[in-house]
Amino acid sequence: MIDTLRLTAEDALGLLERKEVSGAELHRAYLDAVAERDGELHCYLRTVDGAEGDGVPIALKDVISTKGVETTAGSQILAGYVPVFDATVAARCREAGLPVIGKTNTDEFAMGSSTENSSYGPTHNPWDPERVPGGSGGGTAAAVSAGLAPWGLGSDTGGSIKQPSALCGNVGLRPTYGTVSRFGVVAFASSLDQVGPVARNVRDCARLYSIISGRDPADSTTVDVPPVELPEGESLKGIRIGVPKEMNEAEGIEPGVTAAVQRAIEVAGELGAEVGECELPRSVEYGLACYYLIAPAEASSNLARYDGVRYGLRVDADTYYEMVERTRDAGFGDEPKRRIMLGTYALSAGYYDAYYGQAQKVRTLIAREHAAAFERFDVLVSPTSPTVAFKLGEKAADPLAMYLSDLLTIPSCMAGLPGLNVPCGLSGGLPVGLQLIGPQLSENTLFRTGHALERALGFDPVPERLR
Amino acid sequence: MTAGTVPGTVPTWEPVVGLEIHVQLKTRTKMFCRCANGFGGGENTQTCPVCLGFPGALPTVNRRAIEWTIKLGLALDCEIAPQAVFARKNYFYPDLPKGYQISQYDLPSCTNGKVLVPTPDGDHEIGIVRAHLEEDAAKTTHVGGRTGRIGGADYSLVDFNRGGTPLVEIVTGPDVHSSEDARRFLQLLRQTIVELGISDAEMEKGTLRVDANVSVRPEGSSELRTRCELKNMNSFRFVAQGIDAEVARQIAVYESGGEVVQETYDFDAGSGTLTARRSKEEADDYRYFPEPDLVPVEPPAELIERLRAEVPESPARRIRRIEAELDLDRAVVLVTGGLDGLWQETVAAGADRLAAANLIANRLAGVDGSAVDRAELAKLVEARDRIPRAALDEALAKVAEPGFSAAHYLAQEAVSDAAELEPIVTRILDANPGQVAAYKGGKEGLLGFFVGQVMKETGGKANARAVSELVREKLQ
């Protein structure tokens, strides 16, 4: 009997290499665990029986196209849609021999911070099923923490990998924009979307990143990626860590979160890092507002293809335009509709310069502000989420409160920078996430820093109630 | 009603026309995916997730299409942008699978060019505001209903084979002031495109499409009044007819005290009439923004220079050069028919300029000039009046065949002997008293009729010039 609850991907790889277990057996073990525990958590929208590959099984967020396996992005408008092609990341996992356990739950079109916006019902946090797992990638994050997958892929537009990892107590990387192909990933906001790995520890996260990253001819925005180094040591000598004041003192950060993050920063110092203060005033003040212009603007265009003509839901009507209206009305939930309206407005003639155009300028300022900080520091740290996991329904009726969950993750996303969430302790029995931000293509530095801290902090990623 | 018919009370009206020309590039693959580009294949067979707009599919730029667009821009004397940017033009229509069209918008590849159109009263300069690259929409067929449009159709069929074809849009300034100039400009533009080898540019196949923005203004004024857009004109002749019809309509509106309302019209060639489109099908606000799935196009200077070197001498310049040796009309026919090279080389091989021009322009239209042996053609030109008409016809029909030799045809002699021809001429004139009377009454064009009858009678062996002299003599 394989204990999937504590098995890391590296452990699983060892079992496979020593032939103590076959790929099929391992895959079966995860499907069994899903059958046993996912009724309560609802991490998966569907599982895949008899998946190909004799490597470490993987969970894929349902925004990632999988050939022959329904892909809905959490939306009714894509109900029944079965892609005829694999996303590049899915193809790379397939080539690496990773069998797919299943497709994980997500806020509809990755729009949300709690997975409550999934049109297929919410996912529950394995630490406390009355609480949300974060979002939009709550399905993958909860599955990894609950032992329903050793690792998985998420997608991050403004925090959809980092924030759920923080709330579920695991490691999630939002890579540098352009390092991982977006081809075949259902688009939310193209200039921000980035696929990334979620795992139980930093080494697994780095290993999965090495599988999925690298230039893809099918995605013109991808770049060549330096070789990934699996982190080894526990020293942080030579690493300069900056603590942006605004991101650590922002209104709304819970005291328990601040305490855990402060403790982690102290540990970093003890491990040999140089720690100093810095500032990112504009990033924090304007980041969220600009994000909610740019992301909805792009979303309003990206979601235009769901018109009922070629695939997914169609609600018939007498005329074409009526058919499109009815299909979109029935197929989209409130959050996509809200963002389509916001974005359509922001791009409209006469408003473009004031909204979308202006937001793009501020985005450049945010990138410059970060670049200036990286002249003095290698890594910037802050809480990933201002709060620990909140209760289901707590923020569902208040979009603005929900948007604030991403206050600290958004600025670096706007700047195209990589960010790593590493669990750094508990507050009220719930995980707190530490966010590590680096300059572009600094993933190896983030892995090294995260790995050293993870060792020193000794966080147990298995939810207490499942131990 | 004719413009300016009542001097002093109504102004003379000047047409102000800008043209928008869409050219389908004949690249091997589509603009943003690797599907085959071109006709053939059943409906929706040349498609993939990218050109069908499937979730997550991303565009990648066809480099060849970029190069060809730059090349066209250079041929049109444009500035080439060091950085061109694709944007999304957002609107809903079933032929647009992504809900947006990817098109260069505020930063197109080519801007600020011009074409000098040779006319009898000097060169008319037509400004090229821009030439930009975009993707074509799919082909829709609306079935049922009376309009043939989506509103009122029973159902619509969409063929995505055409969707994603690279399309260059060329926009002129409001510099065209007659339907004749429009026609001349389009002929030159088409020839330029064909010579660059980037498109077949055939209106009947839709690989070249022309829309016209038409307004009128009082002669001498520089104002730009409300314009109307004409679409659906599928030949240069119909473009000219459409412009004339719209100009006349607008003049009538102004002269009856009305105002022209901005509208889009379809030109119906059969009836020569304009039909306004239902404005509901027009989207007002395309919400353009830079396409985040593509990086800007930044052609290196060396590439631009290489492409510049590949651009042949412009048709307009060749027309002016050849005009000096012939006349404008013949120069235009030769150049826009792609036959001026053949003409020049045939003359160089010893043929008479004018005779060669006439023969080539009148008899070799549509023939692949490059396949013709110049020396053999020159021999035919020189022998044109000496050999029987039938022999000349047969020779010209075969002149582009490989290994063609004129010798066999040159050996045949036409009958020029008056003694032999006279009885036949007399017989023909006697048999057609009505035509003879008409000719004598001034209808001299009937000469050709009589010559033709004699040719028929002689099986094409008579010398046409000798016959016509004889006929003229007899009817004096």
Image (tube, coloured by chain):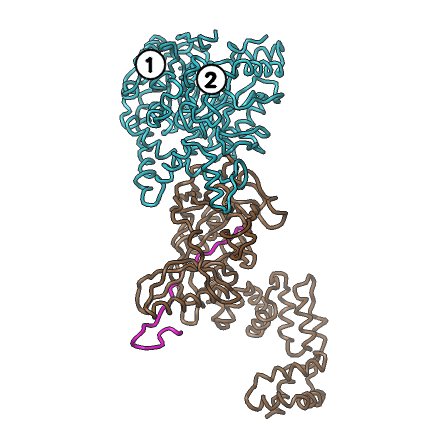
Chain colours: A cyan, B brown
Q: Which mark is residue A257?
A: 1
Q: Position of residue B245 (x, y in %)?
A: 44, 67
Front position in the image: A2 or A240: A2
Of callouts 2 and 1, which one flags the residue occurring earlier in the amino acid sequence? 2
The answer to whether residue A378 is visible is: yes
Q: Nearer the viewer, residue A404 or B330?
A: A404
Residue A454, percent across and down? 42, 11
Q: Is residue A149 magenta?
A: no
CA gap, disc 2 to disc 1?
A: 20 Å
Q: Residues in magenta?
A: B1-27
Give the percent coordinates (x, y) of residue B365: 59, 66
**Chain that bears disc 1:** A
Mark 1 residue type: Val
Residue occupying image coordinates x 55% and y 67%: B344
Mark 2 falls on what kind of element? Answer: helix
Please determine whether, in this image, residue A263 is positioned above or below residue A134: above
Amino acid tagged 2? Ala
Name the one closer to the observer, A89 or B194.
A89
Query: What secondary structure is marked by label 1?
Result: helix
What is the chain letter for disc 2? A
Circle 2 is placed at which residue position?
A: A142
